[in-house]
Image (cartoon, grey):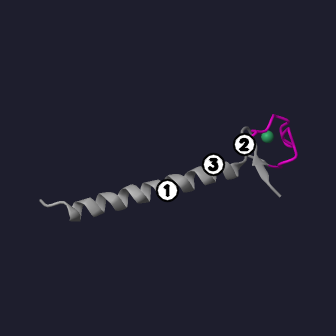
Amino acid sequence: MTLKKCLFCQTENDCVNVECSHCGMALPNKHPQDKGKKKQLFIKVFAAITFLCVLMVYYLPR
Ligand SMILES: [Zn+2]
């Protein structure tokens, strides 16, 4: 089951709910998993850039 976190009271709600079961405010449309995927992609890109930097440090003559 997918859970969405309420922006106002931080309560976990089911994905099927449109409104928060705790405070009744509208839940965000995006799933928390999307944010995690973006973060994973960022870490991969960051690791690739870091690897290239280290490679260039040793490859290029001083
Ligand atoms: Zn809430």
Which badge, 3 or 1, is on the more N-terminal residue?
A: 3
Query: Total marks drawn?
Result: 3
Instruction: Report the Cα–Cα distance between label 3 and label 2.
Output: 8 Å
Where does the N terminus fall, quadrant-wise? bottom right
Dot 3 lies on which element?
helix
Residue at image coords 66%, 49%: 34
Residue 43's tag is 1
Residue 35's tag is 3
Residue, disc 2: 30
Q: Amino acid at mark 1?
A: Ile
Q: Which residues are magenta?
A: 13-30
Q: Amino acid at mark 3?
A: Lys
Instruction: Report the Cα–Cα distance between label 3 and label 1.
Output: 12 Å
Residue at image coords 56%, 56%: 40
- Residue 3 appears at what percent x and percent y? 78, 52
Residue at image coords 49%, 58%: 44
